[in-house]
Image: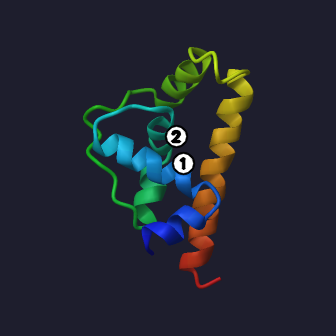
Amino acid sequence: MTQDELRALPGGALVLQGLADLGRGELSTAALVVCLAPTRLAGLGLRLPERATWPADRERALYEALAGDPKTGDAYYRYNALKRELDSFMNALEHRRAGG
């Protein structure tokens, strides 16, 4: 799939931003979201950068990044929303790859 096709999927912009950030060695919120599902994303054909700089506890790292950002609001709500967005992306990509 092209970048535009991936971006058009639910959560596509978030995942593509996360992949780009990881490629630059940045652990942004989007990058930490991508770090939550490396095996599944790789299985869907996405190329992920090396894990050398990834946090050991990726879920905690994402939550703490959200809790430390005053623009986030309720970190718990945002954390769960980002996980749902990631799941939506992966489900949509699986459906698309299956020919749906």
| Distance CA(mark 2)–CA(mark 1) | 8 Å
Label annotation for residue 14 = 1
Residue toward you, 2 or 87: 2
The mark lying in front, picked from 2 and 1, is 1
Mark 2 — residue?
A: 33
> Residue at (48%, 57%) from the top-left corner?
40
Quadrant position of the N terminus in the picture: bottom left
Label annotation for residue 52 = none
Left or right: 6 as drawn, with respect to 26? right
Q: Is residue 10 above or below residue 78?
A: below
CA neighbours of label 1 inside 10 A, class few (<14), some (14 to 19), many (20+) = many
CA neighbours of label 2 inside 10 A, class few (<14), some (14 to 19), many (20+) = many
Left or right: 50 as drawn, with respect to 12? left
State if disc 1 and disc 2 touch (CB < 8 Å). yes
Figure coloring? rainbow
Q: Is residue 35 above or below residue 70?
A: below
Mark 1: amino acid: Leu
Residue toward you, 97 or 4: 4
Mark 2: amino acid: Val
At mark 2, the secondary structure is helix
Q: Return the disc, 2 or 1, that comes first in the chain's sequence.
A: 1
Left or right: 14 as drawn, with respect to 46? right
Image position, residue 94 (x, y; %): 57, 70
Residue toward you, 26 or 62: 26
Name the image quarter holding residue 78. top right
Image position, residue 88 (x, y; %): 66, 57
> Residue at (25%, 35%) from the top-left corner?
52
